[in-house]
Image (cartoon, rainbow, N blue to C red):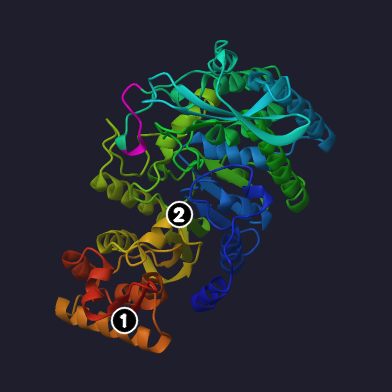
Amino acid sequence: MDIYSIKQKISEIKPTNRNPLYQSHLYWSQKPFNISDLLIEELTEEGDIVFDPFMGSGVTIFESVLLNRKSIGVEINELPIFIVNTLLRKVGDKETLNNLLTEFEDFVDGLNKYYKTWSAEKDDYGIVKKVIFDRESPFTEPVIKEIHYQHLDNRTNYIKEPDIFDIEQFSKNNGYKYINDYVMVPNSRLAVYNEQSVSSLFTPRALCIINDILEYEANLVDQNLKDIIRYILMSALHLIKITDLKSNSQWPLWTPKENCLEKNAVDVIKRRIRLFIGSYDFVDKNFKSTINQASDFNELSNNGDYYIINKGTQHLTNDDIPDNSIDLVITDPPYLGQVLYSEYMQLYYPFLNLKFNFEDEIVISNAQGRSKDEDSYFDLLDQSFEKITRKLKKRKIMCIYFHDSNLSVWNNLINITRKHGLHFLGQVHIYKKLTLKNILSPKKSLQGDSILFFINEKREYEVAEVETIDEIVENIVAHVKFEIKSKGSLTTTQLMDEGLMEYIIQNNWLSKLSAKYKSIIDVFEPFVKWDKENGKWVL
């Protein structure tokens, strides 16, 4: 197996998750589908079983089905399972779907009744496009500052101060029969307060619209069609909620105090309808006509079948997945406290009743009552890897998305994999666009992701630690200087991912390094120069 060749091919690909299939929903940490394609094609044959023990948004499942492989996903929360099943489920003839969505869009258009505002310019009613307001907290009354509106016959933007009718429209509450409000778990990091409910993340007007859509869905008979309406609403909720002027939607449970923004939910939902149509058309044109969702492992009888298990990977049994049955693992394990998936799921629960699992989540969280610290995180990760490697066939590959400069985190991960018989083969970097953090702190932040390759040898490795810590540091500094001299100035990411971490891991130096240094940067920084202007290391 030529891992070097695979790494070369990956380094030549521009990673993307931009195609119609993945644009109709928001799910955090989506991985590039074209990278998954390459891994599946290079490391399996048609009919092989590809396994993602931390399924998330389902990229591994989608691409395995597309490439005629059998696939299995494990996921603790119901929302990502709902995403995968809805997009892969065929809905009879196309005409039925088109009729549903046409009728639904007409219905949504009618909800602009909630956004009527009086326009002095036209001596007629206009449609509110956004409202800017302040509120001291999620528990206090808002103070509306500006109403931005348009007229149906043009797109000219008008701004006005609110009148009594605007305040009534904004505060309208017809009763929310189809919404089961939910009090969230307090978490200061997510700006969730004691006794704060999900409804506080929305304006009363937005809740009226959501309630009307849920009533529309409840009156449908066909479950497939009901799920499509629920899917479209799900994909819009994070955009309908109160946000700031920059629409900072990656913080799903946060709302600002000043310059809060209410968007026109009708506009948002109509766009999500069009994006869903794009996703569905993509599946219809590119996937086989019948996609079988297996109810257990034994039903994975045909190429392209998939099977999703709703439980924690640490609880997998031989009945769920037989030992030594998996041909390839591709996964993005939950990373410490970076994304609190189950807590984010609280946003969707009152509207869609999609359950989330706090107990089995592998995460670090300071939310009240969760008992999710670093020790718990690595213990559950250890239990999960024990299950995963038992399911993976001997001499087969596990690909893990991972990226960090913290040596202790690296050491824990490598120790867990070694303990369960996984041998580290190498890593390859996947570049992404620079984030604000990369720009503001280029020395210490890492760009993009890495894929770590392991082969399942089914035996634990004994590690011989020969060099002293001083010898290890001397070797690392020599390596860093050689890389800079031969390749020119390098970013922290380039140094780490283009050889340095491989060099450290394969020489069994992580344990001693992590005992003395927090970050890999701390090891070599005293011996090379940081060019602040260019954001690179130089001799």
Q: Residues within 10 Å of mark 1 (few under 14, many from 20)?
A: many
Residue 364 is situated, as x and y percent measured from the top left of the image, at: 31, 44
Name the mark on residue 480.
1
Which numbered disc, 1 or 2, marks the residue that appears first in the sequence? 2
Q: How many marks?
A: 2
Up-down relation of residue 313 to residue 220 (above or below): below
- The reply to whether residue 9 is in sight is yes
Mark 1–mark 2 Cα distance, whole angstroms, equals 28 Å
Relative horizontal placement of residue 259, taking residue 265 as reference (left or right): left
Judging by the rendered image, the residue that carries numbered circle 2 is: 332
Up-down relation of residue 352 to residue 427 (above or below): above
Nearer to me, 371 or 273 = 273
Relative horizontal placement of residue 529, taking residue 4 as reference (left or right): left
Nearer to me, 163 or 403 = 163
Q: What is the secondary structure assignment of the residue under circle 2?
A: loop
Name the mark on residue 238.
none
Residue 338 is situated, as x and y percent measured from the top left of the image, at: 37, 48
Magenta span contains residue 192? yes
Q: What is the secondary structure assignment of the residue under circle 1?
A: helix
Residue 501 is situated, as x and y percent measured from the top left of the image, at: 34, 72
Q: Residues within 10 Å of mark 2 (few under 14, many from 20)?
A: some
Residue closest to the far front: 121
Q: Where's the C terminus, which quadrant? A: bottom left
